[in-house]
Amino acid sequence: MIGLTGGIGAGKSTVARVLADLGCFVTDSDAAAKAELNEPEVRDQLVAWWGEDILDRESGRPDRSKIAAIVFNDASERKKLEGLIHPRIEAARRAAFASAPAGTKAFVIDAPLLLEAGLDRECDAVIFVDAPDEVRRARVQADRGWDAAELARREAAQIPLDEKRNRADHIICNDGDPGELTDRVRQTLETIINRHRRGDSSSAYPDDRDE
């Protein structure tokens, strides 16, 4: 079981796709959370908490940008949302893993809040996906339309990046070269699998992380 975390815009999804190509079974917690927001019982609870203004006028579905404006400005509201969504994501993840095909090399939990939710305790190894700050800022500006202030606001709601790095067993730098990234991911996966086969946990090697 491999946990995947990193800074916003570092490219966790890209690393997850490489792991999938290498024979791993990946669950995407962010995609699962988006799906859960559209479930009727979740939608009804959100409306009960925050009113119908959080719904998109055309589709009638929860507007993620309006929800983000609430939860990233009030930690208590964020915790309330996480308490509603996280157990549902966990149930979906377990069901997905149970359906994985034979021969799967490893199960991967791709979760922005891997450490915050305590999912690292379920993992044999945690990979931190890293990228220079200027690269991450450029990516979120291009992909999500966020400026530097919005990126900082979002990251302030998470465990600091330095702590995430320190708690990870492996660090993969995703600085823009697809070929090098694939090689780095392959080598890291092989290291994790070999240690697991020997009965070792990667977390037993805190000073022997892959940079």
Image (spheres, rainbow, N blue to C red):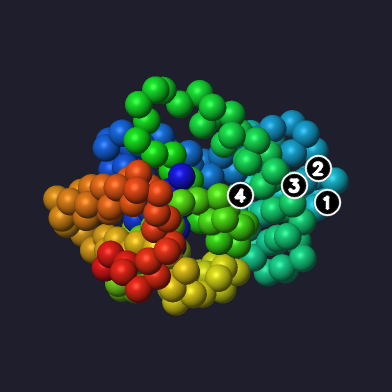
What's the CA distance linking mark 2 and mark 4?
Answer: 15 Å
Return the residue found at the far front: 198
Residue 111 vs residue 146, the one in the foreground:
111
What's the CA distance linking mark 4 and mark 3?
Answer: 15 Å
Q: Amino acid at mark 1?
A: Trp
Q: Are marks 1 and 2 in contact (CB under 8 Å)?
A: yes
For disc 2, the marked residue is 45
The numbered mark, 4 or 3, whose residue comes first in the sequence reads 4
What's the CA distance linking mark 4 and mark 1?
Answer: 15 Å
Asked which secondary structure carries label 3, the reply is: helix
Q: Are marks 3 and 2 in contact (CB under 8 Å)?
A: yes
Picture quadrant where residue 47 is located: top right
Picture coordinates of residue 117, whole percent (x, y):
62, 57
The numbered mark, 3 or 2, whose residue comes first in the sequence reads 2
Q: At 80% across and 38% down in the image, what residue appears?
A: 44
Q: Is residue 60 visible?
A: yes
What's the CA distance linking mark 3 and mark 1?
Answer: 12 Å
For disc 1, the marked residue is 49
The numbered mark, 2 or 4, whose residue comes first in the sequence reads 2
Q: At 70% across and 60% down in the image, what residue appears?
A: 78
Q: Which mark is residue 64?
A: 4
